[in-house]
Amino acid sequence: MIDWQTAIALMIVIVAAGALCYRGWKTISTTTSTGCGTGCQQCPANMPHSANSPQLVQLGNKPVPSVD
């Protein structure tokens, strides 16, 4: 016979293991997509990038000189 503390600890471990298995399965079985994965056409992540797209800039880094 197990006491109530051991039973609760076992339930927590089982739920955590189930959640870990679920997330692992979702990582392996999902297809690659952009955005949140719902596939809506209005999502900015699904839009093609243009020359007017904002560029990421790292602050505090000096530009690397080009080698000609």
Image: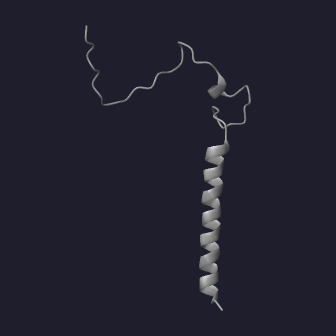
Q: Is 44 rendered above or below residue 4?
A: above
Q: Residue at x 68, y 28 (%)?
A: 43
Quarter assignment of residue 6: bottom right
Q: Nearer the viewer, residue 10 or 42?
A: 10
Quadrant in the picture for the N terminus: bottom right
Q: Residue at x 65, y 33 (%)?
A: 33
Q: Residue furthest top?
A: 68
Q: Residue at x 67, y 41 (%)?
A: 30
Residue 9's x, y, as percent? 59, 78
Q: Residue at x 57, y 14 (%)?
A: 50
Residue 18's x, y, as percent? 65, 63
Residue 16's x, y, as percent? 60, 65
Q: Nearer the viewer, residue 39 or 62?
A: 39
Quarter assignment of residue 41: top right
Residue 59's x, y, as percent? 35, 30
Q: Is 50 rendered above or below residue 20?
A: above
